[in-house]
């Protein structure tokens, strides 16, 4: 089965920008780019010799990591096409190569880090560098395939670093597992590789005493944006014997950039696959509310109001009796109070009256059997504006597809989380969404139904958390789109989501610019787009957004920055003249580079 192109890596907390000095028509040197590194990582407390592959890596002067505890020393450089020995070109000669010695502090936690190279042309793109606790074993340079050539693994736990460089290559490893052993096998890989894991056992017989039989397989063939597609599997070995694990590439593709790390650990020590290094306040800078896996907690309303003007949440709609503590009719509940949790585990037998809730409420449950439906009921007045949010803590889309349907007292459908779009071919496309908004045109009693959209699956991993709450007009996700043109000013476009009817302004600021660099706001002409097709009730499922543009200008005498300078981008909502809290958006790393003309003079 063909799948979407190789997975995209998640965006970092930092976005790097190379900003040229302005001097006539001279432009900066070409920006460096990285295609792969090998090995992909190393053990905490160790030194690792790593080879970086890419382009325009000459005169590299530093390696930059996105978190402390890792340091790199540049050992040597080989330009594209250079060979140390022999005359026949090899796959390795297709890129510049930079040899590094990376030192990892003992207290660096396991997980993904990102590295970039600094050259006179600026900063490169980033590549993942994986830190792990397990001892290291390197793949043998000779072929090691079944039935006779499998490379023996040392005692696990361990991390095997390897590459698939030949078309059709498979890397087989042998290991011994005592009876009753449960092991976890996991692969993390370079962006170029789409890996698969296969387990084999001996099955030799009269006709083929060396035969093997496949007992487990995973290539994580289910793809959904934002979800990890690296393969992993757990297996219990009921008999003590020698077994085999294979790492292979989807469709047999191979190159020097197809690198991987195979972790083999006891099941009880599986831990998390690998996390990304996070800054001191990752939630603020990486806000996400239209994802199936973002966390829905009982402080949701309070968190949302921090992205608006919190004082507007406390506008009185009634008064409370200070002696009895009871609210008079029309009194507004505390908007920052913890949200009550209602568990719907176990399902509801047919004919059972749905549980009654008030807004906001956090619903939790598990779709344990095919066709199981969970229901709750609530009241709404004319003009009430609500939000339905879904989190899938276990299985997620596309394995578990939560379907929400709101019906009135007569059973007539009012709202679902399915967005229908009529495309240019008069075909209807449908997609479920993790967030849906609605304003009630009439009052009444309404029932919310929760189920899997297929009605054919159900198990303990199909867990959900559904938030039913009032709308909070707030500042949503803030994205930056970087557009650079050599020899000219740098342009940074910032897109701000206006969530749940937010109609205020959003103030954007940049702090920490290097000397000689200033920023001004600018306007842009929107590109001409064809007439819109019928996109249905898009406002229920997609946030409205606005775009702002910064132009960063380096004066002709701006001093060169040998290292990246951290620039902070912040946002602040403004509603009815009132200012909301300052929210970190991004950290940019800006460099002022000498022009090509200046480099030639040197």
Image: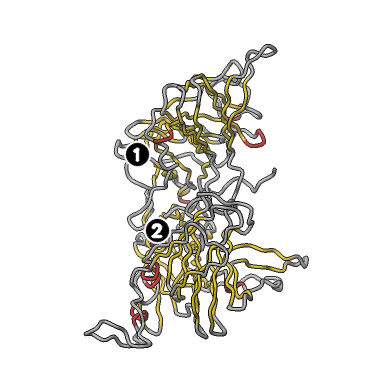
Left or right: residue 138 compared with residue 541: left
**Comes first in the chain, label 1 or label 2:** 1
Q: Nearer the viewer, residue 135 or 35?
A: 135
* Mark 1 closeness class: few <14, some 14–19, many ≥20 residues within 10 Å: some
Q: Is residue 158 above or below residue 22?
A: above
Q: Position of residue 595 (x, y in %)?
A: 47, 53
Instruction: Say whether residue 81 is visible.
Output: no
- The quarter of the image holding the N terminus is top right
Nearer to us in this view, 350 or 327: 350
Label count reads 2
Mark number, residue 71: 1
Q: Residues within 10 Å of mark 2 (few under 14, many from 20)?
A: many
**Quadrant of the snapshot with the C terminus:** top left
Percent position of residue 161, x then y: 48, 30
Q: Secondary structure at mark 1?
A: strand
Q: Which residue is mark 2?
A: 587
Classify residue 287 by image quadrant. bottom left
- Does dot 2 land on a helix, a strand or a loop? strand
Q: Nearer the viewer, residue 168 or 567?
A: 168
């Amino acid at each position: 089965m063909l799948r979407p192109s190789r997975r995209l890596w998640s965006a970092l907390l930092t976005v790097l920008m190379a900003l040229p000095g302005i001097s006539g028509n001279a432009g900066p040197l070409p920006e460096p780019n990285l295609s792969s590194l090998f090995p992909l990582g190393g053990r905490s407390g160790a030194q690792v010799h790593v080879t970086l592959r890419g382009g325009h890596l000459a005169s590299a002067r530093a390696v930059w990591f996105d978190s402390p505890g890792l340091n790199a020393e540049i050992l040597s450089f080989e330009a594209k096409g250079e060979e140390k020995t022999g005359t026949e070109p090899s796959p390795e000669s297709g890129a510049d190569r930079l040899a590094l010695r990376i030192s990892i502090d003992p207290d660096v936690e396991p997980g993904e880090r990102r590295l970039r190279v600094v050259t006179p042309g600026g900063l490169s793109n980033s590549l993942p560098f994986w830190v792990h606790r397990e001892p290291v074993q390197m793949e043998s340079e000779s072929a090691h395939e079944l039935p006779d050539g499998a490379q023996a693994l040392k005692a696990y736990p361990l991390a095997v670093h390897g590459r698939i460089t030949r078309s059709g290559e498979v890397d087989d490893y042998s290991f011994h597992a005592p009876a009753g052993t449960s092991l976890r096998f996991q692969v993390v890989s370079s962006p170029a590789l789409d890996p698969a894991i296969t387990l084999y056992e001996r099955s030799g017989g009269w006709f083929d005493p060396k035969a093997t039989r496949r007992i487990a397989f995973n290539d994580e063939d289910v793809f959904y944006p934002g979800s990890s597609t690296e393969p992993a599997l757990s297996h219990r070995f009921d008999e003590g014997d020698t077994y085999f694990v294979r790492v292979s590439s989807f469709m047999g593709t191979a190159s020097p950039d197809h690198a991987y790390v195979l972790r083999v650990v006891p099941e009880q020590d599986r831990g998390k696959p690998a996390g990304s290094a996070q800054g001191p306040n990752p939630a603020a800078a990486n806000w996400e509310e239209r994802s199936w896996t973002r966390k829905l907690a009982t402080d949701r309303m309070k968190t949302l109001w921090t992205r608006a003007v919190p004082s507007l949440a406390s506008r009185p709609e009634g008064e409370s009796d200070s002696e009895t503590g009871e609210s008079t009719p029309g009194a507004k509940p505390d908007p920052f109070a913890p949200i009550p949790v209602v568990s719907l585990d176990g399902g509801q037998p047919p004919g059972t009256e749905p549980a009654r809730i008030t807004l906001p409420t956090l619903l939790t449950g598990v779709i344990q059997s095919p066709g199981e439906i969970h229901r709750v009921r609530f009241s709404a007045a004319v003009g009430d504006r609500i939000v339905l949010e879904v989190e899938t803590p276990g299985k997620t889309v596309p394995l578990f597809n939560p379907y929400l349907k709101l019906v009135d007292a007569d059973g007539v459908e009012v709202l679902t989380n399915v967005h229908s779009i009529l495309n240019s071919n008069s075909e209807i496309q449908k997609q479920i969404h993790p967030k849906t908004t609605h304003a009630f045109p009439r009052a009444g009693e309404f029932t919310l139904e929760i189920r899997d959209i297929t009605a054919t699956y159900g198990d303990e991993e199909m867990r959900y958390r559904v938030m039913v709450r009032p709308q909070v007009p707030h500042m949503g996700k803030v994205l930056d789109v970087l557009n650079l043109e050599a020899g000219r000013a740098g342009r940074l476009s910032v897109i701000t989501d206006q969530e749940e009817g937010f109609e205020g302004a959003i103030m954007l600021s940049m702090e920490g610019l290097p000397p000689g660099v200033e920023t001004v706001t600018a306007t842009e002409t929107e590109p001409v787009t064809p007439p819109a097709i019928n996109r249905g009730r898009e406002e229920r499922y997609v946030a409205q957004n606005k775009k702002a543009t910064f132009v960063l200008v380096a004066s002709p005498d701006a001093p060169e920055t040998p290292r990246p300078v951290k620039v902070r981008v912040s946002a602040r909502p403004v509603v009815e003249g009132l200012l909301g809290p300052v929210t970190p958006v991004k950290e940019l790393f800006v460099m002022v580079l000498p022009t090509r003309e200046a480099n030639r003079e040197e």
